[in-house]
């Protein structure tokens, strides 16, 4: 999956926004101001960090050891870094949706507590 297709997919998710809070080299996708995807645009090969439920994160790393690793400079328990162009598009979309859903669930729990 290339960066344009990835970006287009992320922005189809409800209330998803994009910004570059860490400088012009880092593209961030958010829902309710919470990050669900982070891309270093200068990294070759292109990779994205995605939020993930801890058990599933480990399973994905074991299943795709050269393509999915613990989140780079992120909480390795809750984030994976994924090589964008080395995995099937359907799998990347599933991982993006899962990341988005993780953020949405936390947002909804916080909203209910108010």
Image: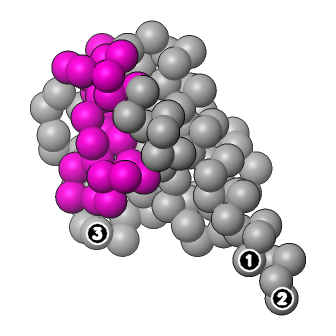
Q: Residue at x 53, y 45 (%)?
A: 53
- Give yes or no for contact between labels 2 and 1 (Cβ–Cβ under 8 Å): yes
According to the image, label 2 marks what residue?
A: 114
Q: Position of residue 104 (x, y in %)?
A: 70, 57
* Between discs 3 and 1, the one toward the N terminus: 3
According to the image, label 3 marks what residue?
A: 22
Residue 87, compared with residue 61, is above or below; it is above
Q: Position of residue 82 (x, y in %)?
A: 33, 32
Reply yes or no: does residue 21 show up in magenta. no
Q: Position of residue 9 (x, y in %)?
A: 59, 33
Q: Secondary structure at mark 3?
A: loop
Reply yes or no: does residue 70 show up in magenta. yes
Q: Residue furthest bottom?
A: 114
According to the image, label 1 marks what residue?
A: 110
Q: Residue at x 35, y 41 (%)?
A: 80
- Crowdedness near tag 3: few (<14), some (14–19) or many (≥20) residues, C-alpha within 10 Å: few
Return the mark for residue 78.
Answer: none
Q: Secondary structure at mark 2?
A: loop
Residue 86, compared with residue 37, is above or below; it is above
Start-end of magenta stretch = 60-86
In front: 31, or 95?
95
Q: Relative to residue 43, is residue 86 drawn left or right?
A: right
Mark 3 or 1: the one toward you:
1
Asked if residue 98 shows in the view, the reply is: yes
Q: Relative to residue 63, is residue 89 drawn left or right?
A: right
- Give yes or no for contact between labels 2 and 3 (Cβ–Cβ under 8 Å): no
Residue 93, compared with residue 13, is above or below; it is above
In front: 25, or 92?
92
Instruction: Report, in whole angstroms, how far the alpha carbon at label 2 lies from the one at label 1.
Output: 7 Å
């Amino acid at each position: 999956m290339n960066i344009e297709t990835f970006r287009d997919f992320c922005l189809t998710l409800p209330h998803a926004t994009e910004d570059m809070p860490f400088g012009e080299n880092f593209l961030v996708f958010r829902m309710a101001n919470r990050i669900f995807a982070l891309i270093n645009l200068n990294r070759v090969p292109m990779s994205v960090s995605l939020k993930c439920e801890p058990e599933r994160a480990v399973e994905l790393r074991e299943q795709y050891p050269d393509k999915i690793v613990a989140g780079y400079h992120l909480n390795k328990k809750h984030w994976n870094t994924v090589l964008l162009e080395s995995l099937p598009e359907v799998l990347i979309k599933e991982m993006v949706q899962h990341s988005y859903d993780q953020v949405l669930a936390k947002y909804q729990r916080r909203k209910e507590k108010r």
